[in-house]
Each structure stands twice: as structure tokens, then as C-alpha cells.
Amino acid sequence: MKEFWKQKLTSRKFWVAVASAAFIILSEGLGFNVDSELYWKLVALALGYIFGEAAVDIARAVKKEEPPA
């Protein structure tokens, strides 16, 4: 279990998600008037990074499972 948390806390995807959630909470919940266009660009950028890295992780895992030729 300790290794699981160490892996999560050192994950860049995790910290991008935390920063994005904090940004959304600050702009929506606390009423910071962030420009709508900037808001959606930052959210899209974070989502693109997270999904892109997830795709790379999946490809790496599939390649690792393939038997050597």
C-alpha cells in the first residue's frame, strides 16, 4: 500500500489533476473572475496532457506484455 501512495504522489498526471481541480475550485467556487476563454484553454490543456500521458502509459504496458520475437 505504501508503494501505491508513493507512486501516486510522484505522478505528474496526479499533480496536473490536483492543480486543475484547484484552479477550477478557485475560479468557480470562490468567484475569481478568470476569463472564460483562458479557463477553457487551461482545462483543455490539462485534460490533453493527462489523456496523452495515459495513452503513452497504456502503449508502454502493452509493449511490455508482448513476448519477444
Image (cartoon, helix red, strand yellow):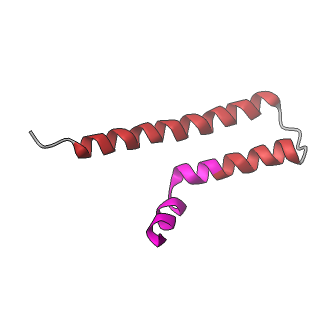
Instruction: Residue 26 in the image: state x and y as whole percent.
Output: 82, 48
Quadrant assignment, res 34: top right
Residue located 76% across and 43% down the image: 24
Residue located 89% across and 48% down the image: 30
Residue 69 falls left or right of residue 63: left
Residue 64 falls left or right of residue 19: left
Queried whether the magenta region covers residue 33, the answer comes back as no
Furthest-left residue in this view: 69
Rendered view: 44 above or below 30:
above
Rendered view: 46 above or below 18:
above
Q: Tell me which segment is drawn in magenta.
A: 1-17
Instruction: Residue 37 in the image: state x and y as whole percent.
Output: 77, 27
Quadrant assignment, res 27: top right
Residue located 47% across and 62% down the image: 7
Q: Locate the C terminus and report the quarter of the image it occupies.
A: top left
Residue 1 falls left or right of residue 60: right
Instruction: Residue 40 in the image: state x and y as whole percent.
Output: 72, 31
